[in-house]
Amino acid sequence: MLASVPAGPDQPLWEAQERFLLAGRRLAPEEKLKRRQPPEDLWRRMARLALERRFPEADEAFLYKFHGLFYASSVEDAFMCRLRVAGGVLSAYQLSGIAELAQRHGHPMMQLTTRGNIQLRGINAGATLDVLRGLSELGIVTRGAGGDGVRNIRANPTAGFDRRELLDVSSLAREAQYRVLADRSLQALPRKFTLGFDGGGAVGALPETCDLGFRAVRVPAGRQVPAGIYFRLLLGGATSHGRLARDAGVVVAPEHALNVLEQVLGIYMEHGDRTNRRRARLLYLLESWGLERFLAELGRRLRERVPGPASVPPAPLLPLPLGACELPPPPEPWAHVGFHNQKPRGKSYVGIVARDGLLRVDQARGLAQLASEYGSGELRLTAQQNLLIPGLPDTQLHRVKEALAELGLEWTASTFRSGSLACTGTAGCPFAAADVKRRAEELVRHLEKLFRFEQPLTIRFSGCHHGCAEHGLADIGLLALRSEPGGRGGECYQLFLGGQTGEGSRLAREFASCVPAAEVPLVVQGVVESYFEQRHAQESFREFVGRLPAAELHASAARSSAARERALQDRGAQERGGQEPAAIDTGVRP
């Protein structure tokens, strides 16, 4: 051990940093700050600032993120508090309590995020500890919800009651959170780390977007490993860096998944870049080392560092080609909205439509009551910015529908609305270039007026390069830019087409580099019309845009220009005449 490294809980962090210093490299400013003031030891300072009703200075604001508190004075002179909800599993009691805290200390509106958790906004400087204590009393933690560490852990929102899943992964998500938060060395990471467990359910967990993903598969008899349910190991996803996780070519038994997690975090903690934040994600370590070296080191650590009884040998990484596995069917695009049968028979779950991913506190209380009165007392948050209520008796679904209507909530929506989401945008993020929630709503309304489209279609708006809405995964993805090329000013968007999740996942390709905001509805309309005109039988939108070369797709959309203009003129005339414009029936059915 190096002489300059103190013994104690921060020893792993200091040792990792010393490797770079001894190599003659400079630590990133954030690394120096963590070295000077460990975020875990900030509570006394937070208590003093809360008592004085003061917000943190710039350096301290970075450390506050490790406790789930985000201060961005350029947006609002208040905190945003991000929760940790492992696997998206909430009790009715917890949701009701969160709503009470939001009403008492912040804005009476809760944000549902694309990582299956909740954010509270408008928290004043004097209320921070009241909120954190209140959440703790509800059994909810915020530690590690921001900053450099393992973020909220994804799992299938339907885990445990999904009729088609291979494996219930909800308990793994919870156990992973307990293990990470209990060991300070596993939080000493050079940058954020995302983790997902997918058991093959109808609503996916998007493990391909994560630094480390586990995807359940079935291995039949007669393969190189014993028959059973395993995880394929996925490594190096980071959609904000334009990467999806790659299959590592190995399977892991579910009982060994958490040991694999711990050793992957150990490698990343020790060798991840501490000098350049931009290259501090796991994917860059994988690119530097190569997959073979990384797997060799991971296998060595599993053999040498994982304790266990003699009857259970340390988990090896079992090489197995993807083609030797039976893959679960892809996620169902509409399984997060509406009523769906679940197990056991005679019960269903309902997916609630949350406009703009927002939920009023009175609606949250009402949903908690519904879950307690008719369901299992549990709710599930999804990556589609909505929530599910499971365990509803089929004989009571009519009462549930009535109660949802009284709350002003819906369980049905058009294809466009069901598949649309947007990040916070300028309303709550200092990095955002546009109010993307408003733009998403405008686009959805435009398309709903023109088309009756009953095939799944996803539309995602991201407000900045961080890509929190994961626009690269969508059929139609839009990324807000601060200005048009050449410095002419004006809000515009990069347009991407053809993203795909699940097996065979791929990021959407760029279709247009800068579409002025006012033209986005027209351009998207033209692409959708091109699909209607030229698709093959039963061809999905992403298959269509993947089949056509970019130049041909551009030309096809351009040929639809006159039709777009006529449609808009007809719509304007009908609206002036007090008539509802007729939608185009595409003839596309599920």
Image (cartoon, helix red, strand yellow):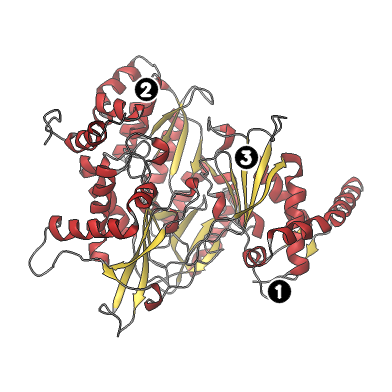
Q: Which residue is mark 3?
A: 480
Sequence order check: which comes first, mark 1 or mark 3?
3
**Could you say where residue 87 lies in the image, as x and y percent from the top left?**
37, 54
Judge from the rendering whether residue 546 lies leftward or rightward of residue 176; answer left or right.
right
Label 2 and label 3: CA atoms lie apart by: 28 Å
**Could you say where residue 331 lies in the image, as x and y percent from the top left?**
49, 66
Disc 1 residue crowd, few under 14, some 14–19, many 20+, Cα 10 Å: few
Sequence order check: which comes first, mark 1 or mark 2?
2
Q: Of 26 and 206, which appears nearest the observer? A: 26
Marks 2 and 3: CB-CB under 8 Å? no
Indicate the amino acid at tag 1: His
**Could you say where residue 55 lies in the image, as x and y percent from the top left?**
40, 19
Look at the image and tell me in which quarter the C terminus lies: bottom right
Q: Secondary structure at mark 2?
A: helix
**Could you say where residue 102 lies in the image, as x and y percent from the top left?**
45, 34
Q: Secondary structure at mark 3?
A: strand
Sequence order check: which comes first, mark 2 or mark 3?
2
Which numbered disc covers residue 59?
A: 2
Indicate the amino acid at tag 3: Ala
| The residue positioned farthest toward the left in the image shown | 310
Q: Residue at left 42%, top 53%? A: 237
Q: Of 274 and 96, which appears nearest the observer? A: 274
Marks 1 and 2: CB-CB under 8 Å? no
Q: Which residue is mark 1?
A: 536
Indicate the amino acid at tag 2: Asp
Residue 59 appearing in the image:
yes
Q: Of 119 and 339, which appears nearest the observer? A: 119
Label 1 and label 2: CA atoms lie apart by: 56 Å
